[in-house]
Structure formats: C-alpha cells, structure tokens
Image (cartoon, rainbow, N blue to C red):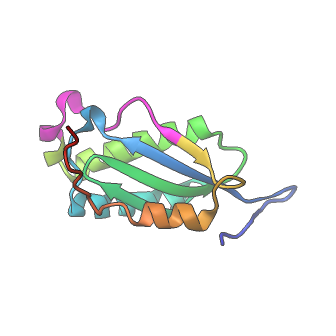
Amino acid sequence: MSEHILKRHNKTLLLYHFFFPLKYRKSAITKDIGEGLKQICLEISERYEVHFIEIGYESKHVHFLVQSVPSYPVSKMIRMLKSITAKQLFQRFPEIKAKLWHGKLWTSGFYANTVGQYSNEEVIRAYVKNQGIEKEYPLCI
C-alpha cells in the first residue's frame, strides 16, 4: 500500500488512475518509447509532487497510477502530464511525429478515477501493470 504524504498541516493518501489515449488512436508506442515514457515520468516526480506508482502502456494508450497532494487538482495534473510527456517524447523519439498528424500526441480527452471505495490499489496496480499485453479479439458477426 502507498504511504501517506505528510505536510505541515495535513496528511493525505490521494491515488488516481489516469488513462490517456493517443491522438487518432494510432499505434505509436513501442517498447523503447514506453520505457522512455517511464523515464520521463520519473523526472516529473523529481520536479513535482506527483508520484508514479505504476505505468502501463499499449501501442494506443497509457495508464498511470499516481499519488499526489491536494494542491494539485486532477485537471492541473492531467494538463501538466500530457504537456510534459508529449514534449519530451517528441524530442527523444522524433519518429512518433511521423505516425501522428499535426504533431499532437494525446487526445483532448482522458479518463480519471480515484482509487478507493469502489476499487482498491491492488486491483488498479495489477490492471495497469498488465498493460502491454495486446489481446486479439475475434470478429463478431
């Protein structure tokens, strides 16, 4: 289980599950790019009070299990994460731009969920960790 974050006047344990699909649902995340994304997220953790507990990805989307503090609203965290990761991934892996039109990495949408009453950290952690195992679904007629 994650540890509480202690501040001068509060103690919090705020966990979030974020899902970011790639623009146009293009397949652009390879193993190297995924590992680069994880490194970028570690760098973000050093600068901001956003701690990545798990990062999982498939070719068309990314899942994050993050812990943060109350001073970061969800919308601010998502905007910051999308902005920094997109900029850094485009710099480190210029081949991504060839797969995406107009130089946008993420869609404007996202999924965010708190980890708590209706789901627990272990369930979300296992789900996020198992990303990258692409499944083939038979066509239903």
Report the front residue among 124 and 64.
124
Is 83 placed above or below 43 here?
A: above
- Farthest residue in the front direction? 141
| Image x and y of residue 28, in percent | 20, 47
- Farthest residue in the right direction? 9
Magenta range: 97-111
Q: Is residue 110 magenta?
A: yes
Is 33 placed above or below 81 here?
A: below
| Side (left or right) of 40 relative to 1 | left
Residue 104 seen anywhere in this rendered image of the structure:
no
| Image x and y of residue 37, in percent | 34, 57
* Quarter occupied by the N terminus: bottom right
| Side (left or right) of 97 relative to 69 | left
Report the front residue among 11 and 139.
139
| Side (left or right) of 85 relative to 138 | right
Kindly identify the residue that appears in the image at 46 percent across and 37 percent down. 110
Kindly identify the residue that appears in the image at 29 percent across and 63 percent down. 133
Report the front residue among 67 and 49.
67
Is 3 placed above or below 110 here?
A: below
Q: Is residue 85 magenta?
A: no
Kindly identify the residue that appears in the image at 71 percent across and 44 percent down. 71
Is 119 placed above or below 99 here?
A: below
| Image x and y of residue 136, in percent | 22, 55
| Image x and y of residue 120, in percent | 64, 61
